[in-house]
Amino acid sequence: MAFKPNYNQQRAERNRAKEQKKQERLQRREEGVAARRAGDQIDGEQSGQDDADVQDDAVSTDTDTKTDTNNA
């Protein structure tokens, strides 16, 4: 004779499988981010000077526009 279906148990098993799959995806995604960040740090050390120049330019344009709007 077959067993009576236990729907709650089956749903719990499906939910556990979903959560495990989500955790595996999240772990792979975090590993990918860590690898990209490690690559950016290596590149960033070599071109760190360039990034600072770009930020300085952005700051100077912001102050230029502020002074123009204040004078108007």
Image (tube, rainbow, N blue to C red):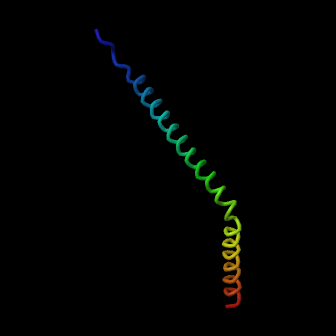
Quadrant in which the C terminus is drawn: bottom right
Residue at the far left in the pictured view = 1
Q: Quadrant of residue 71?
A: bottom right
Q: Quadrant of residue 3?
A: top left
Q: Position of residue 55 (x, y in %)?
A: 68, 71
Q: Position of residue 18 (x, y in %)?
A: 45, 34
In this rendered view, identify the residue nearer to me: 17 or 25. Answer: 25
Residue 25 to residue 33: above or below: above
Q: Position of residue 60 (x, y in %)?
A: 70, 79
In this rendered view, identify the residue nearer to me: 25 or 44. Answer: 44
Could you tell me how many numbered marks the image carries? 0
In this rendered view, identify the residue nearer to me: 31 or 48. Answer: 48
Relative to residue 16, is residue 42 drawn left or right? right
Question: In the image, what residue occupies the spot 49% across and 33% down?
Answer: 20
Question: In the image, what residue occupies the spot 58% across and 52% down?
Answer: 36
Residue at the far bottom in the pictured view = 72
Residue 20 to residue 43: above or below: above
Question: In the image, what residue occupies the spot 69% across and 83% down?
Answer: 64
Residue at the far top in the pictured view = 1
Relative to residue 31, is residue 57 drawn left or right? right
Residue 27 to residue 3: above or below: below
Question: In the image, what residue occupies the spot 67% across and 69% down?
Answer: 50
Relative to residue 9, is residue 34 drawn left or right? right
Residue 52 to residue 6: above or below: below
Quadrant in which the N terminus is drawn: top left
